[in-house]
Image (spheres, rainbow, N blue to C red):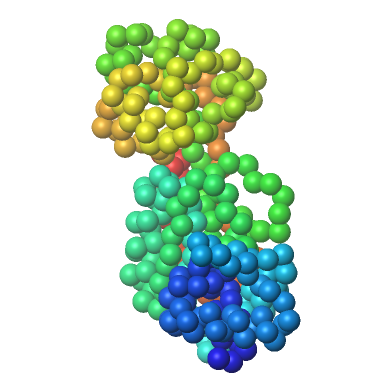
């Protein structure tokens, strides 16, 4: 196995945290991948992975080496793309990350349509409710909801979402509709991971109205909390796109609309510079146009 292939195998094994998984990613057998990494470690005179019968983890040297190798392979890909014309023509795998429910409603349909329009591109969509490090995890484009911290990444605003309190019509008919935020004290509340650990719900455009809440039920799954609210158990707080279908169908109603906090921005975030291949640039143009047609995303 040549040195370049060994480097690609090393990155694949590191990302998969498995020799078998890394081997599949580069189209090799597991023994070949193991030999390739072993040859690389011998050439370097350093251990890149800590191996047990159950796990494969990067050593401290391996983590530092991974960052450098990724940079080398990315630069090589840029050079290859420029030589082959891929810098101007969308080709290759596009890796995208987004929140789970936003991905289901908005990202998955537009990615499918994008792939229909660009036959040379394939895509992998990582739907997770956490902030993914684009560089460390090899992501091309991320959907981010909420204020963005300062970084070297480029952000393209495509819309906004609202933070709403909602409940089932049956629950509201039986228990009454809260008219002001302090009325929440007499309602059964369902907390989600989007709620602060302090138990404070903030209201108003400037979020100046702080209400101490004591949810009877706390759930780590937003979808589960919405389901319980849909069944008429109590009120929950969610982002507007997460409950848009239920509100349109009449399964849920929003309350305290006059006290909503300011809308949260939705951005497409990507790595800036000449490394932005045609597949990234064309997807950003395509996705931004589609999402901006929706405007307020839910």
Task: Please provide percent x and percent y for residue 196.
Answer: 58, 28
Q: Is residue 171 visible?
A: yes
Q: Quadrant of the N terminus?
A: bottom right
Q: Position of residue 107 (x, y in %)?
A: 41, 54
Q: Please report the residue visible at 57 percent of the width from the left and 54 percent of the height from the top.
A: 132
Q: Is residue 220 above or below residue 116?
A: above
Q: How many marks?
A: 0
Along the viewing direction, whichever of 251 and 155 lies nearer the viewer: 251
As drawn, 88 above or below 143: below
Residue at 34%, 26% (x, y): give it.
228
Q: Residue furthest front?
A: 53
Q: Residue 274, image x and y in percent?
A: 65, 74
In the foreground, 34 or 180: 34
Q: Is residue 3 left or right of residue 152?
A: left
Residue at 72% in and 77% down: 46
Q: Position of residue 245 (x, y in %)?
A: 31, 37
Q: Is residue 92 visible?
A: no
Q: Is residue 263 left or right of residue 148?
A: left
Residue 147, picture quadrant? top right
Q: Viewer-proximal residue, 53 or 127?
A: 53
Whether residue 147 is situated above or below residue 189 in the rendered picture: below
Quadrant in which the C terminus is drawn: top left
Query: Which residue is at a point 54% across and 47% down the rendered structure image?
Result: 130
């Amino acid at each position: 196995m040549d040195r370049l292939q060994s480097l690609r195998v090393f990155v694949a094994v590191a990302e998969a945290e498995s020799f078998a998984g890394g081997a599949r990613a580069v189209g090799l057998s597991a023994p070949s991948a193991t030999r390739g990494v072993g040859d690389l470690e011998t050439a370097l005179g350093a251990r890149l992975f800590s191996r047990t019968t159950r796990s494969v983890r990067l050593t401290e040297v391996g983590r530092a080496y991974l960052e450098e190798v990724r940079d080398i392979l990315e630069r090589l890909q840029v050079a290859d793309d420029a030589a082959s014309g891929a810098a101007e023509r969308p080709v290759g795998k596009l890796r995208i990350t987004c929140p789970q429910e936003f991905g289901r409603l908005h990202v998955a349909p537009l990615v499918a349509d994008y792939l229909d329009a660009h036959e040379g591109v394939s895509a992998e969509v990582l739907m997770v409710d956490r902030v993914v490090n684009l560089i460390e995890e090899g992501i091309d484009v991320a959907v981010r909801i909420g204020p963005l911290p300062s970084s070297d990444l480029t952000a393209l605003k495509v819309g906004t979402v609202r933070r709403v309190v909602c409940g089932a019509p049956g629950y509201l008919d039986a228990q009454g509709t809260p008219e002001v935020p302090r009325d929440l004290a007499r309602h059964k509340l369902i907390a989600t991971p989007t709620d602060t650990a302090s138990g404070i719900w903030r209201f108003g455009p400037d979020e100046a109205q702080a209400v101490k809440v004591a949810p009877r039920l706390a759930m780590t799954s937003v979808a589960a909390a919405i389901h319980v609210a849909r069944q008429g158990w109590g009120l929950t707080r969610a982002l507007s796109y997460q409950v848009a279908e239920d509100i349109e169908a009449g399964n849920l109603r929003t309350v305290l609309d006059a006290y909503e906090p300011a809308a949260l921005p939705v951005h497409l975030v990507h790595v800036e510079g000449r490394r932005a291949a045609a597949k990234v640039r064309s997807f950003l143009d395509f996705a931004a146009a589609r999402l901006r047609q929706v405007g307020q995303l839910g």
